[in-house]
Amino acid sequence: WQKVLYERQPFPDNYVDQRFLEELRKNVHARRYRYRAVVFQSGAVVQQLCSVCVFVVTWWYMDAGMLSPQGLFGAALVSSLLGYVLFDAVDSGAGRRESGRTRWADLKSTLVFAAFTYGFSPVLKTLTESISTDTIYAMSALMLLGHLIFFDYGANAAIVSSTLSLNMAIFASVCLASRLPRSLHAFVMVTFAMQIFALWPMLQKKLKAQTPRCYVGVTVLFALAALAGLATVSSVGAVLFASLLLAISCLCPYCLIRLQQLKDNIHGPWDEAEIKEDLSRFLM
Amino acid sequence: MVLKVFFPSCCSSAESGILIGRWISEQNSAVILAVVHFPFIPAQVKQYLSEVQRVTKVSVSVLGSWSNSKQEKEESLSEFLEDLGTIFSHEPWIQISKEGDSNFWSCSTLQKHSNNPKEEEIILVYYDQRKVMLSHLHPPLDTAVSTDHQADDASKLAAIFDTVAKSKILFMTDRYDDGPIKLTHWQSDGVEASIIVELMKQASVPACMLLTFLLSLISGICRSRVLKFWPLSFLWSKLSTCEQLGHRLQHLQVISSDKKAQNQTQLMRKANIFVSLLVDVALGILLMSWLYRKNRIGHLADTLIPVADHVAEELQDLLQWLMGAPAGLKMNRALDQVLGRFFLYHIHLWISYIHLMSPFIEMILWYVGLSACLGLTVALCILSDIIALLTFHIYCFYVYGARLYCLKIYGLSSLWRLFRGKKWNVLRQRVDSCSYDLDQLFIGTLLFTILLFLLPTTALYYLVFTLLRLLVVIVQGLIHLLVDLIDSLPLYSIILRLCRSYRLAAGVKFRVLEQQDGKPLRLLMQINPLSYGSVVQTYRLPTYSCYPKDTWTSLCKKLFLGELIYPWKHKGEKQD
């Protein structure tokens, strides 16, 4: 018996031979993860959660009047400059040469940010005056949740859209900034949002690629800072947040590895055809 | 096949003679047009007929004989009549004879050359020659419904009507004419004519020439280059009075042109235009006589200013309401105040403009009212234009509101694509994904947020002013509908249908007169008049409909997107 249909054989068409199951393969593409590696990768999620937490806590301080806009602006400026220097220093300028982006372009972008935000801050201040605070909170919470869902954590999935994620974060920050008492507050808040949601992940990505050890340290420090900040606002929230972070960084990898062992994928000649060869030579 | 003989009812009392008419072989029917009396010379008859044939292009020939014997039947006469068949050879030779006062006529055919002289069934159909000649047969309008069979019937009937109508020359001789041949037909007792009509025909020629000259002068002035410069030509196209005057000018040109109307439709069109013009002008003069009596113009002017003031005050109140918290809506206070003040200032300007105008309004109205002598439609168009000018502030508000709203809607739709990381690909006409720079994203989202939160305020202003604008537009549209009605109503056709219903024929009906065995069936053909609906449908005059014919859905879409609906014109126009 031959497994072909184009030759006449003394068997019916639906005949199945004994050798049929010999070609069965299990878990061909399943990967074995190491616990440390998974915990390391989960750092991206922890970082983003902490960013959102830091942003919300900062807004809380600003709204309560415990943090002056000048102070926040100064701190943000200093950390931005530090981050900018670090960004180039980590890979000693290799990334910049590759992308071909000049410092003049950076300066121009910064000026555009600052000018537009400063110009629009009075508008932002009065934008949502007539809309109730609860609506604004609900909208911001939804947008920040959307930011966390659509963020590019490095996974290759259809749902990932860094553009949408960043836009949602900006929308939430504009909504929250419009609740602040003065237009300077709004300006500083939106600038801070830009730094923490747009610039900080870029630096993180570079750190993660170049110096993994340093990245782990930064993540832990950042998480601790976020926790400390949250603790001053609400101790219950801090405890909950700490348990969330722990669950994501320790429990979830453990579950993944445990469940990975139960994986039972079967492959065989009945699979649909898969083109593995490089097709580019046919396209010439 | 049944032989049909169409016999004019006016000839039923004619003296004996021969029948002349047209033989329609396809339908196997004979249309008798007249009776030639004894005595005659056959050669002269033949010559006369060929002459008639040359003029009318209808193959008129001698079809048979006619005997009307008051007394007992004379043997010699019938023999003589049979002999005539040999002189005027026609196949078949129809012999109709009426005996005394009896209602039953005998009718027979002679087929000399056919081998089987079988008895053919004959139907005698009486028709009123005058009515059939004057009437105009209309083919069935709904050709989709009528089958081929019906169309065939209609064309057969049309051939008969056509024959009678074309042989008008045959009926122009009456019994007082000295000629070699004596005929009996509907006008044989005297040709119908009216002195007034003849005089008017004579007078119309110089009148038309004068009118043509004047019209060419006026249209020459209108076409001169001075009036064609950009702002003026734009203004002309926007004023409905100018459109209406141009329309009427064209009508006058059609009437006064010295070209003869080629067919019935063109003739009716001319007559319709003429009557509609006359009625229009008569109504206009009536209106003018009413207006200029008892100083009504002055009263009108006195009421006009307070009304305009009142409208402005109402608008101010409306704006004050909008600047608060209208209907409990959550508006952006700052934008609300800005827009409200802007519009209030505009109303202030408007009121001062009205007050500046107020001393002159009466004079303007007085002179403008004179134009009512050009017709009621012109007066109505002027009224529409005055409404448009007096509600110019509403129009301005609408335009500002619509522009602002349109800007927001388009901005929001494109920024929403940016928000999702997409963009509109113009080349492929679709939405593609696109990677934006960080600063583009930031500014785009900032603007998106601002526009989104400001949208309700703008939308409310837009809504209120659009409703006001629609109100004005509907009033203007009703006026235009009235003008269109007067312009397009075929008054002459309707009057004709009312007084001379046979002139516009839709078809015929047959009534059985007598039926007896051995005698031919006698039918009376009567004309079915055209229904009023189809009269209007057939002879409706075209109007100058320059406004865009939006469907309701496209109108709603335009309103939603904030596109400007065409200014100063009614868009909800239904195609009637």
Image (cartoon, coloured by chain):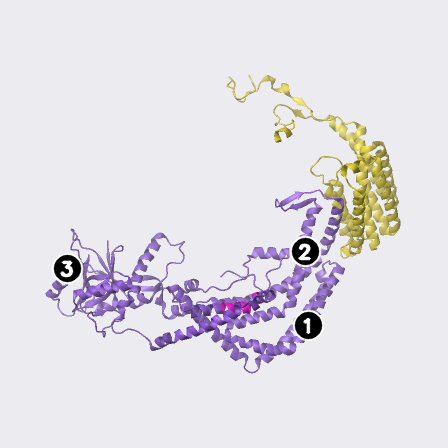
Chain colours: A yellow, B purple
| Quadrant (top left, top right, bottom left, bottom right) of the C terminus of chain A | top right
Q: Which residues are magenta?
A: B237-248
Residue identified by numbered label 2: B407
- x, y percentage for residue B431? 64, 45
At 69% across and 37% down in the image, what residue appears? A158
Rendered image: mark on residue B351: 1
Mark 1, Cα crowd under 10 Å, few <14 / some 14-19 / many 20+, is: some
Q: What is the quadrant of residue B295 in the picture?
A: bottom right
Badge count: 3
- x, y percentage for residue B46? 20, 63
Q: Is residue B539 on the magenta stretch?
A: no
- x, y percentage for residue B417? 68, 47
Rendered image: mark on residue B86: 3
Mark 3, Cα crowd under 10 Å, few <14 / some 14-19 / many 20+, is: few
Task: Point out the tag, 1 or 3, that comes first from the N-terminus.
Answer: 3
Residue type of the residue flagged with mark 3: Thr
Chain of the residue under the numbered disc 3 shown in the image: B
Q: Are dots 1 and 3 on a single chain?
A: yes
Say whether marks 2 and 1 touch (CB < 8 Å). no
